[in-house]
Image: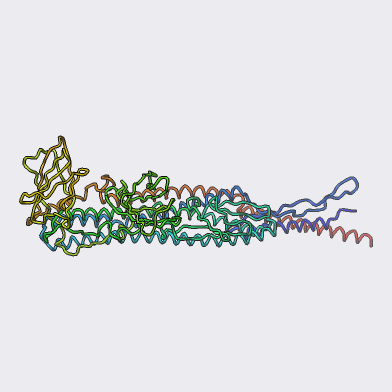
Amino acid sequence: MSIDLLNIARTGIQASQAQLGVTSNNIANANTEGYNRQVATQASSQSQRLGNNFYGTGTYVSDVKRVYNEFAARELRIGQTSMSAAETSYSKLSELDQIYAQVGQMVPENLNNFFASINSVADLPSDLGIRSSSLSSAQQLANGLNQMQSQLDGQVKQTNSQIEAITTRINEIGKELGSLNVELMKSQDQDSQVLDKQGALILELSEYAQVNVIPLDTGAKSIMLGGSMMLVSGEVSMSMGVSAGDPYPNEPRINASIGDKTLNVDPSKLGGQLGALFSFRDDTLIPASTELGQLALGVADTFNGMQSKGIDLNGEVGSNIFADINDPLMALGRVGAFSTNTGDALMSANIDDVGALSGGSYELSFTTADGYQLKDNQTGKQTALTLTSGQLTSDAGFSINVDITNGPIADGDKFEIRPTAGGAAGLKVVMTDPKGIAAAGPTLTPATANSGNTAISLNSMDSSAGGFQGIGSSITFQLDTAANTYEAFNAAGASLGTGAITNNNINAFGMDFDITRNGTATADSFTFDLSLAEGDNSNAVAMASLSNSKLMNNGTGTLTSVFENTKLDIGSQTKSAEVRVSSATAIYQQASNRVQSESGVNLDEEAANLMRFQQSYQASARIMTTAQTIFDTLFSSVR
C-alpha cells in the first residue's frame, strides 16, 4: 500500500466544497427572518498503517448543524410576549386617551355651559328665550354624553375585532405547526429549514400569547399557550374560537376546541397581545363606560330632582328635564344573567341613590345555604341581602327586583350587576316646553316660636300624591321630634292628618323633606308657601350652585370630577404603559442580541470563512496537480 495523494486531495476538495456551500448559504440567508446559522463539522478520515506508522487518508464533513440555543430562544419568546403585551396596551390606551382629550373635552364643557345657562335663567327667570337656550344646552350635554358613549362602544367593537383576528391567526399557525411536526417526525428533527420555519412561527405565536414549547421524542414539538392550553400536540392542532360573552354577549370570550370538547380559556393567563386586549377591554374600557354612565345618571338625577323642588312658569311642580334615571333606556344593560343559571328568575336594577353609586360592577349570587350575596367586584366586599316583597336593597345606591313570574331562582344562580351601565347611551332631554324649567321654589317659613333646634330641607314635591295642596296654597307641618310624629295643616289651619317621622324623613301630602336635629327634642312648626311669585328664581339659583357641590361617590366628588377622575386615571395608565414599553423593549433587545450573537449570521465572519475555505479548496486542488505531476514523472521514468 502507499499514500493515496489523489484520494486525499479529493476528500479535501469535497470537504472544502461543502464548507463553501454552508458558508454561502449562511451569507445568502443573512436577511432571512428566522434563519439560524449553520456550521459544517469536519473530521479526519480513518488513518492507514504503512510499516510502523499511521498515515492520514483525508477528511470529510461529518455533520451540518443548525446553531440553536433553546435557552436563548425561550428568553427571546418571553421577551417578545412581554413587549407585544406592553405595546398593545400602550397603543390601545393611547387611542382612548386621545378620545378623552379630544372628544371627551366637550363633556365637562357642555356640563359647565348647562350650569351657566341655568344661572342665566336665574338672572331672568321669565325670559323664554333664555329658557329655550337652556334647554338647548341640556340637549348638547345629552348629545355629548351619547357621543362619548358611542366612542367607547366603538373601542369595544374594535378590540373585539382584534381579538377575533388574532385567534384566527393563532389557528392558522397551529395548523402550520402541526404540518411541520409531521415533516420533522419524518426527518427525526434534522431538517434545518423546517426547524427554522417552525421557530419563526413559534416566535410569531409568542407575540399573541405566552408560549411553552415541549420537545417530543418523535422530533415534533408540542405547543402550549398561557401555560395551560395545548395548541399543538404532535401533528394534532387544537382550534381556538370566539363565542358570545357571559353574561354580556357583546363582550366575547375565547375558547379552545379539540374534537367535540370545548373549554373556555382564561385570558388573564394568556399574556401577549390577547391578554393585553382582554385586560384593556375588561379593566379599562368597561369601567370607563360605567363611570360615564354614572355621570349621566348624576346629571339626570340632579336636575330632575331640583325640578321636583320647584315651580315652573305654568304654575306647576317642575317636571323632568332629562329621562328618568330608571327609564328602560337608561337601565339598559344593568343586569346580566350567567349562562350556567338553571333557574328562571329575572333580575332588574333600580337606582335609589345616585350619590351612593361607585360606577363599579357587582356579582349577585344565590345559594340555598347562604341566600342572596352581593359582591363588589372592585373591593371584594360581600354583603348578604334580604328579599323583601320581591326586592333586594343594597347600601350601594341601588336595589334589585327579583321577578319569579317565569319560575324561581335556583341554587347557584349568578348575575352581574352594573348599576350605571346604559346611563350615558340612554340619556336624553324629555322637556320640550321652556316654561317647564322650575326656576321658582316654595318659600319655607319656620314658626317664630320654634326652638331653633330643628331644621328641614325639601327633597321633592309630587303633585300627583294624595293630599297635595296645589300650587298657590300652603301646607304646615308641626313636628314633635321627641315622639317622632308630625301633624299637617292646610292654609286654613285645618288638620290634614298625622304620621310618624321615619329616619328623620317625612313623605306625606306630596311633600318629601328631611329633618336635621340639633340639641333637645322639641315641637317645632314649618310652613311651605307654594305660591308662584313673579320673578322668583330661588330654585334656579339653587340649581346653578350645584356645579361645585359634592353630590357623587358618597359626597366625595362633583359631577365634573366623576369624568375628570376617569380621564386622569386613563392618562396615568397610558403613561405607565409607555414606561412598560420602554422596559419590555430593552429586555427583548437584550434577548434578541443574545440569539443573534449565537444563531445569527455575521457577514464579516462568513466572508472570512469564505476566503479560508476557498484557499483550502485551492490547496487541495494543488495536491491533485502535484500528485498528477509525480505520477507523470514516475510513468516517464519507466518508459
Colouring mode (rainbow / by chain / secondary structure / one colour): rainbow
Who is closer to the viewer here, 294 or 362? 362
Q: Is residue 330 left or right of residue 238?
A: left
Q: Where's the C terminus, which quadrant? A: bottom right
Who is closer to the viewer here, 416 or 40? 416
Inspect this view and state whether residue 592 appears: no
Residue at point 81%, 59% (across, down)? 625
Who is closer to the viewer here, 377 or 139? 377
Outermost residue toward the top? Answer: 520
Residue at point 7%, 57% (across, down)? 534
How far from the left and from the top, in percent, is residue 307? 18, 55
Outermost residue toward the right? Answer: 639
Relative to 54, residue 145 above or below: below
Q: Is residue 530 left or right of residue 26?
A: left
How far from the left and from the top, in percent, is residue 247? 42, 56
Inspect this view and state whether residue 372 appears: yes
Q: How many marks?
A: 0
How far from the left and from the top, in percent, is residue 545? 18, 50
How far from the left and from the top, in percent, is residue 474? 9, 52
